[in-house]
Image (spheres, helix red, strand yellow):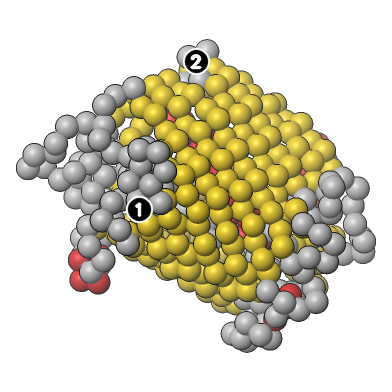
Amino acid sequence: MNNKIFLQFLCLICFNNIVVADIIVRELGKEGDEPKPFVLPYAFASEAMGFVAGVAGGISGLPQEQNSFVTTALVSNEGAAAVYAFFNNYQLAKNSHMFMDVSLGLGEFPQQRAYLDTSPPGDSPPAGSNDSSADNFFEAEGFSNWLEIDFKYVFNIGNAKSNPINVFTLSEGLLVGGANGGEIFNPFKSGRTYLQTSFFHHNRNYDVDTEFPLSTTGIGFSLNYDNTDFPVNPSTGSFLGTGIRYDPGFGNNKEWSVAELEYSTFFKLPKGPLTEQQVLAFNAWTSHTITDTPAPHYFGPTLGGLFRLRAYPIERFHDLNAIYYSAEFRTIPRSNILRKITFLEFANLEWWEFTVFYEIGRVAPNWDVKELHSSMKTDVGISLRIMANNDIGRLDFAWSDEDAAVWLMYGHPF
């Protein structure tokens, strides 16, 4: 595992919940569970941070059934220290279509990697660009802090009409009731359409001199149409989203703005004699910098890491524009082996899934169809995923001609 970016797993652990904030997942035959607290100590060793010890804890179902609160803190013998907290899915009033998420991260690390130039690149491609060298990066001591507050309004149409919180019913981890959509593509008859407003502040610091912006404070808007059957583990339907992030230039920042467009679609294949579910999943995403001034390299059009071009390090590629495509074949074998592991009963393990995937994409200084589809970066991979406590855990292995990586994360990449 690329331990140098293991902390990204901790700080991203709950981000996927933001796009499914208005749901409740229940087991067949159960009206609702009691709040579930948990405490989980952990430890690992890495070249970048040395020996790390930490503890994660949280509770779901308080003060509302769809709420979750998760926090984790860690320290290392090399001087790393961090704390993260997430409070998700809070309904602002009874029967309201408005929900709120809050997330916070504070961390100081002995080695942070950045694909940035510390001096003018000269004749060589700039660090992080599509043609840049894999060795053109630096690692330095610094901190990474952020705060985000998100408000999501679910429109009173489609499956959300008079039903602001959708209740999904599962049997052995598979959907048997409460499908969100997927049969027809019509926001007024199927699926959920929502407008999300995000207020963010992100700040990074490296113990080296760089001319690139590292702090940003601004607002984001996104309009999304989720027409999948079950957002946590889609098997049919599609997702369409568009958004914009904007920093008006607070403090010493320069004004920047970035727009995004994403589309995912899912096709359920017939069951095989040894399979419980088979799905073909496709994703397309593009990002465009509207202003002349770029966003910070970690917040603009980037590729590499947990979700896009997984064989490459986080933020390996960044520029003013990006495009990306992915295809996955997901299959759940007929097996109850996980449910027989008695000492893991607290995790409510239901099934495991094997996935193969292919990814392709690139970054570029201009949003030009021909340029963005030339000299593209590719990778292939396999993934082992499990359904635990009504959520997806995944372990990805990815390979490219430049690098290889192993990722541990919650939720499907799309």
Given residues 190 and 5, the one toward you in this image is 190
Kindly give the residue lying farthest to the left in the view shown: 123
State the mark number for residue 256: 1
Q: Nearer the viewer, mark 1 or mark 2?
A: 1
For the question of whether residue 340 can be seen, the reply is no
Residue 135 position (above or below residue 265): above
Left-right relation of 363 to 159? left
Q: Position of residue 280 (x, y in %)?
A: 53, 71
Q: From this viewpoint, which residue is outermost toward the front?
A: 251
**Which residue is at 49% across, 15% downward?**
79
Does 288 appear above or below 127?
Answer: below
Q: Amino acid at mark 2?
A: Gly
Q: In the rendering, at what x and y percent does residue 183 appear? A: 65, 84
The disc placed on residue 104 is none
How far across and how far down the image is residue 407, in percent?
Answer: 50, 43
Disc 1 secondary structure class: strand
- Position of 160 with respect to 118 (left or right) is right
Q: Amino acid at mark 1?
A: Trp
Sequence order check, earlier mark of 1 and 2: 2
Q: Is residue 339 visible?
A: yes
Residue drawn 62% across and 82% down? 187
Q: Label 2 belongs to which residue?
A: 79
Task: Determine the secondary structure under disc 2.
Answer: loop
Query: Which residue corresponds to the image point at 85% horizontal and 47% vertical from the top-left?
Result: 63
Pointers 1 and 2 in contact (C-beta within 8 Å):
no
